[in-house]
Image: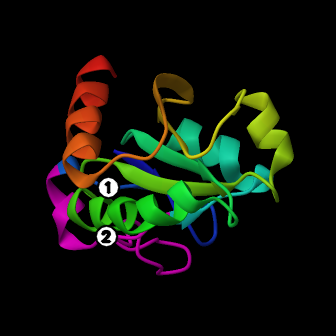
Amino acid sequence: MELVCPRCGAVNRVPAERLGDDPKCGKCAAPLLPGAPIDLGVGGFDKFIARSELPVVVDFWASWCGPCKMMAPVFAQAARELNTSFRFAKVETDQEQELAARYGIRSIPTLVVFRAGREVARQPGALDAGRLRAWLAAAARAA
């Protein structure tokens, strides 16, 4: 399985059965599945979503957004608990307006699941932990 390093952007191959063994990047030794959302910008976004074989869940958010702040701990918890099933990333829409425009983000927070670089599911609005898990399970089936 291919995973893009969140630190250096190197593409690493990891056997699927070893995902739970805290794999490290072969180039920079950073954890490939850090158990926390990864901040993405326009520079590494396309490679990260296209070359990571696990589905990538992207939270499009803004620092001034109340619902975004409410959902942030739920999203971080999901990243810790589901890091061998999904990659979790965040895009700050005020800083990354090009990405927000490209994906038609009209409200925040908006969650988007990508598989092999293409969008497979989208959910606008904040979710609690139970609804987030249910939505991710449905998105995984759709992917």
Q: Earlier in the sequence, mark 1 or mark 2?
A: 1
Give whichever of 122, 44 is nearer the camera: 122
**Residue under the image location 80 percent in, 52 percent down:** 96
**Residue under the image location 68 percent in, 41 percent down:** 46
Q: Which residues are magenta?
A: 17-37
Query: Dot 2, how many residues are within 10 Å of its Cα: few (below 14), some (14-19), or many (20+)?
Result: some
* Location of residue 130 in the rendering, given as x and y in whole percent from the top left corner: 19, 47
Q: Quadrant of the N terminus?
A: top left
Q: Is residue 79 above or below residue 123?
A: below
Q: Secondary structure at mark 1?
A: loop
Question: Magenta span has 61?
Answer: no
Is 3 left or right of 59, judged from the image as shown?
left
Residue hosting label 2: 23
Residue 140 seen in render: yes
* Location of residue 20 in the rendering, given as x and y in whole percent from the top left corner: 17, 64
Question: Magenta span has 19?
Answer: yes
**Residue under the image location 29 percent in, 67 percent down:** 77
What amino acid type is highlighted by mark number 1? Answer: Val
Predominant SS along the magenta part? loop
Q: How many badges with numbers are in the image?
A: 2
Judged from this view, the residue extending furthest toward the bottom is 29
Residue hosting label 1: 14
* Location of residue 57 in the rendering, given as x and y in whole percent from the top left corner: 44, 44
Q: Is residue 134 above or below residue 30?
A: above
* Location of residue 21 in the rendering, given as x and y in whole percent from the top left corner: 19, 70
Name the quadrant containing residue 102. Answer: top right
